[in-house]
Amino acid sequence: MRTFIDAGSIHERPVMPSRLYSSTGLPSGIAHLDEHCHFLTTKNFPQPNGWARAIAQEGLWYNASTGDELIQHELLLPTESLDKMIPMHHESVLGVSYLAPHIIQEKRNVVNEARENIAKPVQQINSKLQELLFERPTYQGLGKVSDVDQTRVEDLQAFFDRYYTPDNMLTVVSGNVQPAAVAMALEKYFGTNPPRRPQRLEQNLQLALGENEVRHATIWDPKLTKSQICLAFPAPALENFRDRAAMAILVNLLGQGSQSLLHQRLEEQLNLATEVYSHTSSFKQTGMTNIQFSTEPKREKEALSAALKTIQTLSTQPVSPQKLGETKRKLIHAFLRSQEISGDATMQLGSEALSGHLDYYLNYVQGIQSITPQDLMRVAQQYLNPRRYAVVFGVHGPKPTPASIQDQAELSGIAFRGYQK
Amino acid sequence: MSRMYPSPMMTADLPLSAAAPSASTGASGGKPSIAGMPQQTLLVNGCPAVLQTSLHRSTSALSLQLPAPPGQDALRALWTQTLLAGSEGTKRFLEQALTRGINVTLDKRGNRLLLNLDGPAGQEADLLRTAMSLLQHPVMDPNTFERNRQNLIQSAQAQLQDPATPLYERMVQRLYGESHPYARSLQESLAALQRLSLADVMGWHQQMMADPRNIRIAMVSALPPEPQQDILNQGIQQSGWRGGGFGPFQPMNLVPPAQHNFVGRSKPILLPNESIERAIVYRGWRAPAISDPDYPAFCVMRKLMEDSGGLFFRRMRIDAGLVYSFKQQYKSLQSAAHYQFSAHIDGDKLAKSLDVLRSVTDELVHQTVPPRDLQRAKNRVLFEAKSQTETPSQVSDFNSQWLGCDLAPLSLREFETLIQRITPQDVRRVAARMFHPASGFEVTGITAPQAVLEKLPTGHARTADG
């Protein structure tokens, strides 16, 4: 059982300056802090962590997460406990009570979480990549320590009142359940949430890259033993079903599995890279296709150049019907397999339905089946443009002095234009 | 090595009984489990098998369990790479399997390497053909082998850079004894990686395959056991996999039982490291192995300590705010097991954290767990087991914790019965066995800047009362 909230860190005061996002007045990190508070004190469990203890007593699993455009609260439970647990889930989602002395505990946890997160080079690289592509680092969600410290009870209550409204939420239950009975139970509890139309500033992730713009940055860290190269291209937005299906196929062709183009070219033929990986995500108005691999120090230029050339072949050469057919079958089998796990199915279903794109999920198999080689070339030309991308180099070593940063940044030898961070 | 708690051993000579899935009460009662009782049998070539019928109608799972070379991580790693990525032909073969919905993975559990396959229901024969092709006709390419070896060497070298690695190794050496196979260092593995040849790996593989009694097969499918057995027997006959050659491998001959003739709290291992900001702390204890009669009580005790409702979380994070995240791990091998706690901790919170850690284990030793907390822990163990057995491949994975240690798997119902029997006294006995200085054995390792180590109170830094 998951409840999704159409909100996230996107509504907070930006942690880095950007023309793309307005300052909403909400402190950075508040969406994440609020998510933590839902497990802390609630109206019927006023003692700190009382709700969490009651859930633990049943042996159940709870969690929550905050993204740029979505918050989700999760409770994994046996079907036979559903009647008992719907009110408990409601209690956590809508019965939260913000009490100043108790919130201090969660502020400390949030700050500790941020510190542990920032210590990991992979997290730094991912945050920087999103910063280059959207001018919105993933660290936005963790917030500035000063903002987290200064967040008041009134701020949290205002956040709740503004976003935890019936028109802005969706609860999904999956498993061996009776839908009509579950709907009645959900209505009984979640139906009491009063409708209200607070003033909200509509804000979504925006693509920051200009036409033919390449942005790059370097992260130095002694913990890295190989150079990491992480590329991000724009990707279709949630509503663009056909392009999303085509991009899912392209990403699989590029970097998923031992027969993928990048694996074959970079690992097998050129012996230039290892750990090739690709992934695509869609948001309300934009998306990100992420391609990453490891290489040896001083071979970054060669590896990046070879990767870009390989990626470009998808824009210029049609994929053979046989290869396309195999890739479709792999994706469909993987999707069907993921639907057998209740937790995974709930996440996919809810995140599509919340944004009004349930049909993409419901018709995923047909959508994948319908893609043609021409679709792939069109989508590759539109999104996987080797002159429009962001790249972050993760490099072994301590951060160099400012004077040598340019030298280090040019270790790839690529003539970057435009933005440089 | 035998399990002391009830359930038949893997004797593989029990009559195969027709079995519809049993109506297990499940973790929380009332609903059937997706899988029936595991049935043991012998296949046509003498290979022992465990067959289980699933209510789940859309997928099936097959697992072939190969003996893993004990204490030889390098050979195991090279063998794994060779079986699944030994040549371009092998990689293409696996990609083709994916287009048929057949997913193949290799995993290490206990003393065994598990070749796991899952795919659409009705494709059970294809699962076996795919497995047999990989095992009977492995395609090896010396260049690919060399590249795989170099990648493994690089991974090992990167792991050597991790400041936690020497700490962990010292802790395990202290727990098992320096010369014990379970305590082999990464440096030793690295040397073996550089030394082993493709012929060594293939020699091991051929030795393991030469006698079907070395391999265990487990299947979870919607089919009843008899048709499962028929499919396996037909596939084995078609593949020509039969005995002869080397004779059965005896893994126990290679691994003498670990010594446990010491008790107490060993002097802490302190490793100064000026390149890290936060201290890294490990604390390890010898623990009941999966075959041990105390294993079910240990499972319950772990849940009293772990997760968001457990003592570590409450004391370390909620009450004292000492740390945000930490890890607990349990490793069970053929003749021994250990349990460990690890965390990254600020230098100024280190002494307090060690005190709180001690208070948690002392509480379990000296106080009887309240019935409500005990039931919570049992519920957690059972719910976790149930939520991790939603599909045949998950059931297969659940079974592998026993099969990996050459034990017969328990059904969810049998497991639930064992867990529900655990009493507060059982938990206290296991806690005393693991944590009491008079009966358990505890090792603490800390790596941190010298200045942080020097500030540790005497009780944490220099005493050795065991």
Image (spheres, coloured by chain):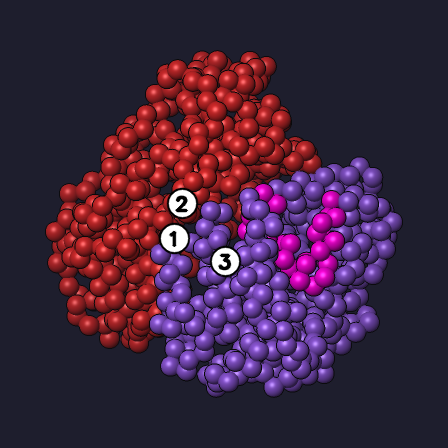
Report helix, strand or loop for mark 3. helix
The x, y position of residue B16, in whole percent, is 42, 17
Residue B28 badge: 2
Report which colour depicts chain B.
red
* Letter of the chain shown purple in the rendering: A
Instruction: Identify whether A62 is placed above or below B180.
Output: below
A282 in relation to A110, above or below? above
Q: Position of residue A7 (x, y in %)?
A: 62, 71
Q: Say whether mark 1 and mark 2 are on the same chain.
A: no
Name the residue rendered at 38%, 58% in the picture: A56
- Magenta region, main secondary structure: helix
The reply, left or right, for residue A279 in relation to residue A418 is: left
- The amino acid sitting under disc 1 is Gly
The span from disc 2 to disc 3 (Cα, nearest Å) is 16 Å
The relative height of residue B445 versus residue B243 in the rendered view (above or below) is below
What SS does tag 2 mark? loop
**Viewer-nearest of labels 1 and 3?**
3
Which mark is on residue A358?
none
Q: Position of residue A63 (x, y in %)?
A: 48, 61
Residue annotated with mark 1: A59
Q: Which residues are magenta?
A: A339-365
Chain that bears disc 3: A
Name the residue nearer the viewer: B146 or B69: B69
Disc 2 crowd rating (10 Å Cα; few below 14, some 14-19, many 20+) is: some
Q: Which residue is mark 3?
A: A86
Q: Is residue A301 visible?
A: no
Letter of the chain that mark 1 sits on in the rendering: A
Which quarter of the picture shows residue B69? top left
Mark 2 touches mark 3? (CB < 8 Å): no
Q: Residues within 10 Å of mark 3 (few under 14, many from 20)?
A: some
Q: Amino acid at mark 2?
A: Ser
